[in-house]
Image (spheres, rainbow, N blue to C red):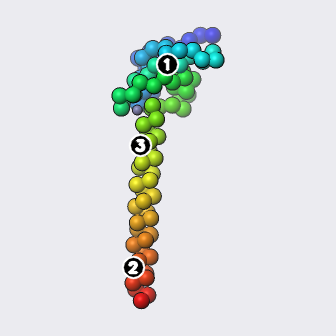
Amino acid sequence: MKINNLAGVKFGRLTAIGIAFRKNGAIHWQCKCDCGNEPAVRGRDLTSGDTRSCGCLRRDVAREMSIRKYRKRLFRYTDEATEFLNDN
Ligand SMILES: [Zn+2]
């Protein structure tokens, strides 16, 4: 099996540094994330674009989503409160 040399290549927030280990025939790359974490990521996940951060990207997106959801809920409650006040 040919090993793609990913060292120095950047995938999203991750930069592959070198081979970390091989598990079940899959090469895992030691990566450095923009946030400072250094996760080992399966090479295939890097090249396919499945993994683009140590997990912080997902966390950031989740946080952003929950903020949006919270805001939406806040607006809805405000609307309901306004309607309630208008009705009474
Ligand atoms: Zn990260």
The numbered mark, 1 or 3, whose residue comes first in the sequence reads 1
Do the CB atoms of the residues marked 2 and 1 lie less than 8 Å apart? Answer: no
Q: Which amino acid type is shown beneath numbered disc 1?
A: Trp
Q: Which amino acid type is shown beneath numbered disc 2?
A: Thr
**Height in image: 51 above or below 29?**
below
Residue pointed to by mark 3: 60
From the image, which quarter does the C terminus lie in? bottom left
At 60% across and 17% down in the image, what residue appears?
A: 23
Q: CA distance from mark 2 to mark 1?
A: 55 Å
Residue pointed to by mark 1: 29
Specify the label residue 47 is tagged with. none
Query: Could you classify mark 1 by the number of other residues whose Cα lies within 10 Å: few (under 14), some (14-19), or many (20 or more)?
Result: many
Do the CB atoms of the residues marked 2 and 3 lie less than 8 Å apart? Answer: no
Query: Could you classify mark 3 by the number of other residues whose Cα lies within 10 Å: few (under 14), some (14-19), or many (20 or more)?
Result: few
Residue in front for this viewpoint, 22 or 49: 22
Residue 10 in view, yes or no:
no
Quadrant of the picture in which ligand 1 is shown: top left
Residue 85 at x, y = what percent?
Answer: 39, 84
Residue 52 at x, y = what percent?
Answer: 47, 31
Q: Secondary structure at mark 3?
A: helix
Q: Which amino acid type is shown beneath numbered disc 3?
A: Asp
Q: Secondary structure at mark 1?
A: strand
From the image, which quarter does the N terminus lie in? top right
The numbered mark, 2 or 3, whose residue comes first in the sequence reads 3
Specify the label residue 82 is tagged with. 2
